[in-house]
Amino acid sequence: MTTSAVAVDTHRVERLVELREAVQKALEGKPTAVELALVALLARGHVLIEDVPGVGKTTLARALARAVGGEIHRVQFTSDLLPSDVLGVTVYDRRRGDFVLRRGPIFANIVLADEINRASPRTQSALLEAMNDGQVSIDGQTLRLPEPFFVIATQNPQDFTGTFPLPESQLDRFMVRIRIGYPPPSVEMALMLAAGTDRVERVPTVLEPESLLALQDTVDRVSVDSSLATYLQALVTASRTAPTLALGASPRAGINLLHAARARALLHGRRYCIADDIHDLAVPRLAHRVRLASHAEGYVPTCEEADAAIRDVVARVPVPL
């Protein structure tokens, strides 16, 4: 490797360290949640943050958006929100004598979909094409979205009043589901003493959209040994044959897990994957994409139940040496 190539790699690693540190300024004491969000961002995925109110879901989303820069739009999902409120709508312009498109908040580099499961299934489905193909269809027009395009959605647990469970097709579009949990006592004390302070304001903008695209391209070039690819395939297959699961991981889930493993390797300063990159990401990448066999039709498993089922699957698949 040439000296210039080493310098480029070192520069990229430094930028990733700065990005991680910037986001952690707003969400202290939760390094795992921050890393999972950054992995999805680098792997061109989307993030679903699920937890009880008040633990920092929106804070993490806002901090990540601020650190990355670019155009940012936030949408507060409510029961009366319509698909056109997200995508946009064609209206008649009397001055021009013609119909014009008023673009919705989906046209941004980063979209914060706050409390996504408070909107109706019809409105939730408005994000499917955008998250999968990077485009939207409005009144017969197909329009490309800006690049990079990243959705960070938050949702409350399914047993909370006024929520609509996300369907499997929607959940499958999210690369990772993150649970934040309560902060460590020392961090919680600091939050109490700093009441009224917006910690997101402390987050600097570390990357521009062009820099993020370059990092995402670098992720695609991270090498994966054939033994690791076989291990990943075995995990996905095991989820489909596990007696505790009625619906296993989809092919998209396996592809996403491979991309995520590459992104984690780069985030740790490596240009190659190791078994831990796949093993440690299996639960947050696969648990929200499966359906448990032990519950009645229509029952939505809790995070704990789905996580436990995937942990059992992972434990039964030998890790390559």
Image (tube, rainbow, N blue to C red):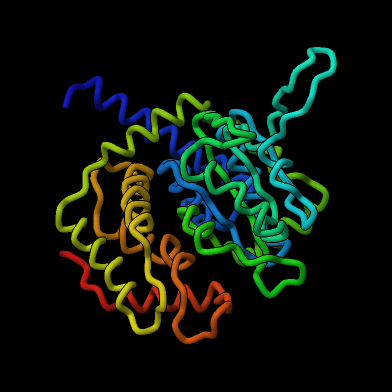
Relative horizontal placement of residue 12, taking residue 181 as reference (left or right): left
Instruction: Work out whether residue 187 can be spotted.
Output: no
Relative horizontal placement of residue 227, taking residue 66 as reference (left or right): left
Q: How many marks?
A: 0
Could you tell me which residue is drawn at 17 percent across and 51 percent down? 225
The quarter of the picture where the N terminus appears is: top left
Could you tell me which residue is drawn at 33 percent across and 52 percent down? 255
- Relative to 97, is 211 above or below? below
Residue 106, horizontal then vertical, whole percent: 63, 37
Q: Nearer the viewer, residue 22 or 155?
A: 155
Residue 156, horizontal then vertical, whole percent: 68, 64
The quarter of the picture where the C terminus appears is: bottom left
Q: Nearer the viewer, residue 89 or 113?
A: 89
Could you tell me which residue is drawn at 78 percent across and 59 percent down? 192
Instruction: Work out whether residue 216 can be spotted.
Output: yes
- Relative to 19, is 319 above or below? below
Relative horizontal placement of residue 278, taking residue 287 as reference (left or right): left
- Relative to 196, is 6 above or below? above
Could you tell me which residue is drawn at 61 percent across and 45 percent down? 25
Quarter of the rendering containing residue 151:
top right
- Relative to 103, is 177 above or below? below
Residue 64, horizontal then vertical, whole percent: 58, 42
Residue reaching furthest top? 96
Relative horizontal placement of residue 237, taking residue 157 as reference (left or right): left
Residue 73, horizontal then vertical, whole percent: 68, 36
Q: Nearer the viewer, residue 199 or 255?
A: 255
Q: Nearer the viewer, residue 120 or 99?
A: 99
